[in-house]
Amino acid sequence: MPALIGRNPGYTPRRSAGLTSYERALARAGLGPVAGIDEAGRGACAGPLVVAAVILDPAKLPKLHEVADSKALTAAARERAYSEVLAAALDWHVVIIPPGEIDKAGLHVCNVEGMRRALAGLSQQSRYVLTDGFPVRGLGVPALAMWKGDEVAACVAAASVVAKVTRDRLMRDLHQRYPQYGFARHKGYATPAHSKALAEHGPCPEHRFSFANVSGLRGLGRRSGT
């Protein structure tokens, strides 16, 4: 019977390490620095898709107190976490994909390409990548897709925070141009209030016309922003 090959305990993520367990295990295996990638705005029917890549400084991981899945944080907590991430990051990069590009290429294609572009935009070369949700080909380095990665890996949670805060700020800016839609409140997601505004005013240039709830209203109301 062939001998069983044991797993090196030093390379195994430990639950006791919390969000930093994967980065620490990969670093011990000689696979650092580790980049995390995540997006914000995938399910919105207006506004851009924002993708962020973040490499955290291993020495500063213990200082990450506010970082968590961005969707689980209040707006004020996300802003604090954003500042914390930038202070702890060795490198970070954000890609902003406008609605027209999403309509032309498709949401999933833009999401995958955005992840590639976010990683390529880092000035520091990562040796391993953690992505949230689904595998991404063509990154050029080994990668692991993690289910709910923003809840289990610090670098993915950091990327989630950067992407979310960046997009929220963009949507607040869009609210100044198109106040009738309430972008500052719902950030472009299809809430009842947003749907009501769409039915009343019709879509504006910042809406995603490839989304069924927007394309169905193309001829209704008046076209905003024209």
Image (spheres, rainbow, N blue to C red):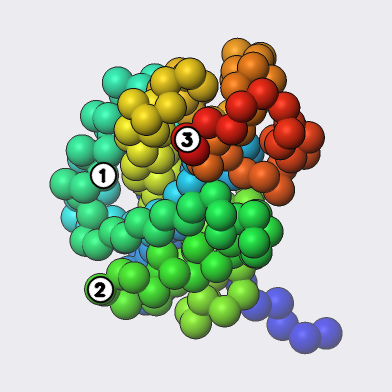
First in residue order: circle 1 vs circle 3: 1
Nearer the observer, disc 3 or disc 2? 3
Q: Residue at x 44, y 69 (%)?
A: 117
3D distance between C-alphas at marks 1 and 2: 17 Å
Element carrying mark 1: helix
- Type of residue at label 2? Ser
Which mark's residue is nearer the viewer, 1 or 2? 2
| Residue under pointer 2 | 123
Label disc, if present, on residue 225 of the rendered structure: 3
Query: Residue 98: x and y, percent?
Result: 49, 52
Q: Residues within 10 Å of mark 3 (few under 14, many from 20)?
A: few
The answer to whether marks 3 and 2 mark residues whose Cβ atoms lie closer than 8 Å is no
> Please, is residue 188 above or below residue 7 in the view?
above
Residue ID at (36%, 38%): 170
The kind of residue tagged 3 is Gly
Which residue corresponds to the image point at 42% horizontal and 21% vertical from the top-left? 179
**Of residues 215 and 119, which is closer to you in this image?**
215
Q: Earlier in the sequence, mark 1 or mark 2?
A: 1
Of helix, strand and loop, which one carries label 2? loop
The numbered disc on residue 52 is none
Q: Quadrant of the N terminus?
A: bottom right
State the mark number for residue 85: 1
Q: Is residue 200 left or right of residue 59?
A: right
